[in-house]
Each structure stands twice: as C-alpha cells, then as structure tokens.
Image (cartoon, helix red, strand yellow):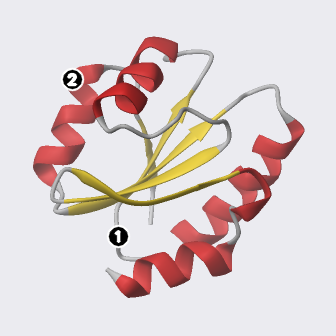
C-alpha cells in the first residue's frame, strides 16, 4: 500500500474523515532510529490493507504537536499512532516500531 505524506492540519483531517482506521508514522528526517523505524513501516505498508501515512517532523512540526495535544499522546519521534474512528487506539515509538508490532496492532483492530 502507498504511504501518503501529511503536511497540514487539513491533510490530517481529510485522512481521518476518509478512513475508519489508519496508521501514522511521525518521522524525523535526521534521526537514525527514525530511519530504521521508517524501513519497518515501509515493509508493513506493503502487506496491510489499512491506510498508512507519514508526517515529517521537520516539515510539519506544528501539526505533529497539535496531534499530540489533541489526542493526549506524548510526542515522540519516531512514533506510530494507530487511529480508529478518529481516536488513537494504539501507539508505540523508537525501537518498538517493527513490522511484527505493527502487524499485531493491525490484527487486533
């Protein structure tokens, strides 16, 4: 499945309105841990039917912070957020972002 990039609040709202469920990776363009997490996320995205999105922290810092604040999830990078019916139902960060952890979360939804 294609990973779509979110750059604005409007993009994010549209993603939530369009999909009952989705995964979002908050990704730092400069962090080696984030690079590893992105590779795991890309492998996962190839196998799931759940829509996948990415937000580049350096390019959309305000959006990243707004998501953290409005969904009461401490901002981390890298970080995966799983949304269902516009609410965060699962999240993880750093080395816990693996294809297996993503698949388990996807299977439980």
Residue 13 lies in what quarter of the image?
A: top left
Helix or strand or loop: what does disc 2 sit on? helix
Q: Nearer the viewer, residue 18 or 90?
A: 90
Helix or strand or loop: what does disc 1 sit on? loop
Q: Is residue 56 left or right of residue 93?
A: left
The crowding category of the residue bearing disc 1, from other C-alpha atoms within 10 Å (few below 14, some 14 to 19, many at least 20), is: some
> Residue 43, how many percent across, how many down?
65, 69
Q: Nearer the viewer, residue 6 or 20?
A: 20
Q: Residue at x 73, y 28 (%)?
A: 29
Q: Residue at x 36, y 76 (%)?
A: 49
Say if residue 47 shows up in the picture: no
> Residue 52, how many percent across, how many down?
42, 56
Question: Farthest residue toward the right?
Answer: 32
Residue 9 lies in what quarter of the image?
A: top left
Q: Is residue 101 left or right of residue 50?
A: right
Q: Residue at x 83, y 32 (%)?
A: 31
Residue behind mark 2: 10
> Residue 62, how many percent across, how many down?
43, 12
Residue behind mark 1: 50
Quadrant placement of the C terminus: bottom left
Q: Residue at x 16, y 62 (%)?
A: 20
Q: Is residue 86 above or below residue 97?
A: above
Per the rendering, the mark at residue 6 is none
């Amino acid at each position: 499945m294609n990973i779509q990039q979110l750059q604005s609040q409007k993009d994010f709202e549209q993603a939530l309105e369009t999909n009952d469920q989705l995964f979002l990776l908050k990704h730092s363009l400069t962090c080696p841990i984030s690079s590893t997490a992105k590779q795991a996320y890309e492998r996962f995205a190839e196998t799931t039917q759940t829509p996948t999105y990415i937000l580049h922290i350096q390019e959309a810092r305000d959006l990243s912070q707004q998501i953290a604040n409005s969904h009461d999830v401490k901002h981390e990078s890298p970080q995966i957020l799983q949304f269902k019916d516009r609410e965060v139902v699962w999240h993880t960060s750093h080395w816990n972002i693996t294809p297996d952890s993503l698949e388990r979360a996807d299977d439980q939804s």
